[in-house]
Amino acid sequence: MRPAVELRAVVLAGARPGETDPVARAAGVRFKCLAPVAGRAMVERVVEALAGLPALRHILLLADPAAGVARLPVVARELAAGRLALRAPEATPSTSVAAALGEAGDGPLLVATADHPLLDRPILEAFLGPALSSGAAVVVGLAPESAVRAAAPASRRTWWRFRDGRFSGANLFLLRGAEARPALAFWRRVEAERKRPWRIVRLLGVTDLLLYLAGRLTLAEAMARASRLLGCSVTAVSIPIGAAAIDVDRPDDLALVEAILACRAAGREA
């Protein structure tokens, strides 16, 4: 896959100020992005996957300076090659992404998170091919329940329920320049109301929320309503690889992703 556009990526590896992440605590590290999976920090695995994409021109890694991620071998290599820049995150995830989008100019920006150690080239290409060709301002990566269950039958995931199936988020997004800015503005409004969920419901729209909760919307219908709500075109890409939706949200996910990586190393599907 070699799209004609110049693709950039941002990796969100920050931590919420004043909070100790349970994954970091379980792993015995100060920052979640440093939690080791099969002997390597999660964030290093994500950077390595992105760096292996021929179409990707630049990676912006946003991490707390105290995390010392520049000392990780893959991060150090990409920094030395000039393919990666390392900075502290902004105050919130939305403002971090907005700043990265501004640097990307009119080109597309791939957004990934540091807690996705199973990310690899097949997952990235399965998402980026349809995402880049869609022309949408915002593209969301999802994995269908059947694929996730095949990869990890007992895994606990958050499911988005639609009339045509259930999907779990893949922590992958594609934003297309200035066209995506209305979505980021809406995201900032939602972040501002994080502790007032009733206001978030109002922002989302009661009718659309009730239709979703009742299971009346297909995935395509939900994306069409999201486009009207956000003021820009939004679509979803269904990634037929279960590992795409398996990130490390809880301490028990560490053992799960290590088991999947062990299967990969042994040449077995997972």
Image: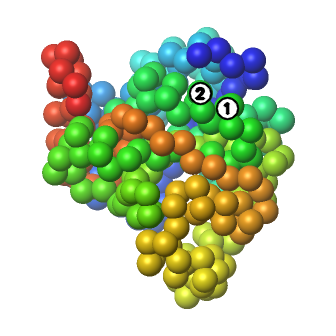
In this view, the residue in front, 69 or 177, is 177
| Crowd class of label 2 (few under 14; some 14 to 19; many from 20; radius 10 Å) | some
- Residue 200: x and y, percent? 59, 79
Left or right for 184, reference 214: right
Instruction: Give the residue displayed 76% in from the left and 22% down from the top.
Output: 5
Q: Amino acid at mark 1?
A: Leu
Pointer 1: what residue?
132
Q: Amino acid at mark 2?
A: Gly
Instruction: Give the residue displayed 60% in from the left and 33% down from the top.
Output: 130
- Contact check, label 2 and label 1, Cβ < 8 Å: yes
Left or right for 140, reference 159: right
| Crowd class of label 1 (few under 14; some 14 to 19; many from 20; radius 10 Å) | some
Residue 129 bears which disc, if any?
Answer: 2
In this view, the residue in front, 255 or 23, is 255
At mark 1, the secondary structure is helix
Q: Is residue 247 visible?
A: no
Decide: is 221 above or below 104.
below
Instruction: Give the residue displayed 74% in from the left and 53% down from the top.
Output: 233
Instruction: Give the residue displayed 69% in from the left and 72% down from the top.
Output: 189
- Residue 221: x and y, percent? 60, 62
Q: Quadrant of the N terminus?
A: top right
Left or right for 126, reference 111: left
Q: Is residue 68 visible?
A: yes
- Residue 83: x and y, percent? 63, 18
Q: Number of numbered discs present?
A: 2
In this view, the residue in front, 102 or 241, is 241
